[in-house]
Each structure stands twice: as C-alpha cells, then as structure tokens.
Amino acid sequence: MELLSDEGFRFDGRRAAEFRKIQGRLGVFDHADGSAILQQGNTKVLAAVFGPREPMASQRGAVSQERCIVDVEYSRAAFASAERKRRARGDKKAQEISLSLKKTFEATILTTLYPRSAISIFVEVLQADGGDYAVCVNAATLALIDAGIPIRDVCCAVSCGVAIKDNVAYSLLDLAYSEETARIPTIVATGMPKTGEMVFFEVESRLHMDYFRAHQCI
Amino acid sequence: MLSVEQLSKQIADICPEDHLKSFLQRDVRPDGRSLDELRPLVLAKNVAPTADSSAMIRLGNTKVICGITAETIKPAAATPTDGSFSVNFEFSPVCSPNAKAGPPNEVAQTMSIFLDGILKQVFDNNQLCIEPDVLAWTLFIDVYCLEDDGNVTDAAMMSVISSLRDLKLPEITIDEETAKPVVNVEKSTPVSLKMIPVSTTYGEFSGILLLDPTARETELGSSPITVVCSEKGALLCFNRSGGSPLSQEQVAAAIENSKRRSSTIYDQYFA
C-alpha cells in the first residue's frame, strides 16, 4: 500500500500532516466525576475519572502524605479491532499501557494539591482504528478537564509515522490502522502545548537519526 | 440556600431508606416514576462497526453495549451439525470506581450464565452449520456494561437480542476441488431466533415491587426479581436469588406484567 501518493495524499485522502475528524463529548457518564468520549476518525475511546477520593483498600500501601495516587486502568472491548481479540483484563499489554498512562498523568495532574487521596482514570477502547494510545491520552485529558481536576497543562498525544519518499521524510500524523501495520517507523508523543514539554515519547522501530531530527517539530 | 433537589439528594445520602420509604408511601419513586414505570429506553444499532453486529441500550442512566463477532471453526465431534456461541459479560472499568483488573467478578459471571441460559432456549445452533463436521460458525457475544444505574439485566438482554437480530452471516461454500471455504459477502442471511425473549426486572423494597430499579433502589432492597418472557407470552425464566419472601399474588402479578411488557417491547422494537 502506498502511504503517500505523488500528489501528496494518503490512502484516505488526507495530507501528510492532516488529522482525522475529531469528535468528542464531555460529561457522558453521570456516576463518574468526569467523563469523555473521543473519536478520531474511526478510533473511539471512552474515559472516566473518579476522584479525588479516598484511596481504596488495595491502594493503602501507596498512600502518600505529599501527593495523591494516580491510578489508571486501560481496557479494550473484544470487538474493538477487525479481528476479535479477547484479552483477559490485566494482561501484559494492557498493564504496560496502563503504566505509561499512569506516568503521563502523574506528571500532568497537580498531585500535591490532594495528599492522601486517589484519582482513578479508566479508559475503554471501543473501536481501534490506529493511534489508540494517543486517543486514550486525549480522552483521559478531556475527562480530567470535565472532572475539574487541576492539571499543569492540557496533555495531548499524537501518533506519527515516517514515510520516506524520494529521500525526503514526511511525517504522517494521526495514523490509521492500515498505516500502522505498514511497518513504517512510528512515534507516539505526548506533550504539553503551552510549556512545550514532552511527557511521553515512544519509538518502536528503527529510524535514522537524520530523519528523527526533522521531526522535532512534533 | 440549598435547592429542593440538592436537599433531597443530601437526605438520600444520609438516610436512604427513609428517603425511599417517604416516596413509596405516596406511590411514587424518587425520580418521579410510578411503581411500574420504565425509565426512558433508547436503542442504538450498529454502534461498533468493527463488530459484525452491535447494539447499545440506554435505560435511564444504565448503558450496556453488545458486540457480536462471527468466526469459523470446526464443529465439535459430538455435534457435527452444530455451530456454537459464547456469551461474555463484563463490567467495563469506566462503569464503576471499584473496578479491578483481573477476571470478571461474580456478578458479571452470573450475568454471563443468565444470558447464555436464555439464548440456549431461543437460538438453534444448527443454523450455524456450514458443512457438517467440516466448518461451522461460532458467535462471540461480548457485552459490556458502561454505566450501572441498576437493572443491567434488562439492558444486557435487550442489547444481545437486538445484535442477534441484526446479525447477517455471509454465505460460505466449500470448494470441492481445493476443499477451501469460499466466502460470498454479497449473499448474507440473518440468523433466526425461535422467539424474542424480553427480560423484566423488579427491585424489591419492603415487600413492594419496583419495576426497573435504579442502582440506589437495588442496593436498598433485598434482591431483584427477573422474569423473562417471549413476545407470545411463553415464560422462559423466573429468577429470584434469595431475598425477603414474596406472596403468590405478587409473583403472579410480576409474571403477568412481564408478559405484557414483552409483547409491547417486541411490537415497538423488534416487529
């Protein structure tokens, strides 16, 4: 599959730096302190935030006198991807994603304002069509905003692929599933727009340093 | 100065039983419903395009989503002309602040068994057979509760039935020469149900039956009653797991009411 046509269009007609259609709604759940549903293209993620509240019995060990505990759980519906994947809740992949989300939001939330408390963020992927992790971060940020929890800055994430055409590297922003599986180097980056700080950065494939520098603008 | 709603909510939090009792004495419930009134029901189809069919039910604030994925398998040796289905119900982590990672808890397992039991009565696995002893369909029915404000049972049952009704399986023929399956997506047939089961759940509080209980009404009461009837009035399931005793009249009234509700729901959503 050709990632970028000669005229500069991707398989779904987007330009290299063009995002998919973004739709979101806040306050979709009544029982959660904050909630959001975010859809980027065909990737749909629900996020719910509970807290700040008293830590649960299982979290007692981690209670801190200086800051609140941030607990994130990531889950994915079995029918989320085109091929049904029933993963037991708490499998390795989910735990890895939960942990990286937790680290991201521990850095974002002003945890020192709520000592001896816990904030729980739950994320459920209903439809996975590429850029799942990034949409999870964005949905969770929206849910935190809906809950009114003080945060350092709005945490935004984007998935990006590098397509090399005629020895020029192009960033394909907001990857769709078919682009993710095309075995191009992919970068997932989470950052804070106002301060320009990067919170999370992951590259899981080989990428030549020359092309990497060209992508600092992310 | 607090508004009436805020005051009512505080009283509900401090002394919930008295709060509910004071409403029931006037034959009405805290959300304004009568004792046998349903919350607003919304059915949305095809909410998860990645699944082969899907539906989401909103019953008041309770939200349940069901997705069915069809795959092919070799039929079991004991039943060569039957396909199979499996129901998996889970409470999504977004549903409750007390969600824990790991296998589904008892309530979720019980719900899976309940849904499976009803489906076994209304769904014939024979229709899932493609080629006896060679290939058959297996349906994975995944149900997730996204928000639990009581009566997840009725919402889950309806989401499963709605998804099943919308499911279309493409025609598969086994090529004689290559012995490989050939899929013809142009020709899809819907699956059939012997009857349409509709579940009606009552919460029970001090001997009074409350149709379609909210989460608060369920936790204050003893144990809900679930009656499943088909659109023609056949009783498929009567479930009451312990709780305070009910009179025979109450049981009979619950079943009668259920039968009427089943045909109403059928006419409105599935006819």
Image: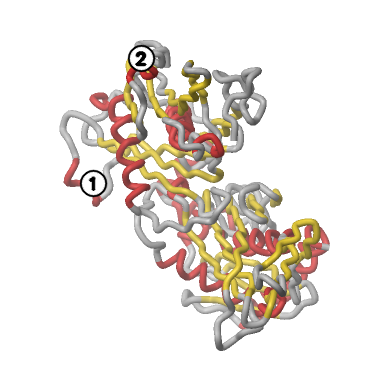
Which chain's residue wears label 1?
A
Do callouts 1 and 2 mark residues in contact (Cβ within 8 Å)?
Answer: no
**Mark 1, residues whose alpha carbon is within 10 Å: few (<14), some, or many (≥20)?**
few
Label 1 or label 2, whichever comes before in sequence order: 1
Q: Which residue is mark 2?
A: A213
- Which residue is the extreme one toward the bottom? B78
- Is residue B7 at all visible to an observer of this figure? no
Under circle 2, the secondary element is: helix
Is B41 located above or below residue B164 in the figure? above
Q: Residue at x 33, y 30 (%)?
A: A105
- Kindly indicate the quadrant of the structure image that contains residue A16: top right
* Position in image of residue B234 (x %, y %): 74, 80
Chain ID of residue with mark 2 = A
Q: Position of residue A148 (x, y in %)?
A: 42, 26
Please name the residue that numbered disc 1 is placed on.
A59
At label 1, the amino acid type is: Gln
Q: In the picture provided, is B104 more to the left or to the right than B172?
A: left
Q: Residue at horizontal 27%, vertical 43%?
A: A55
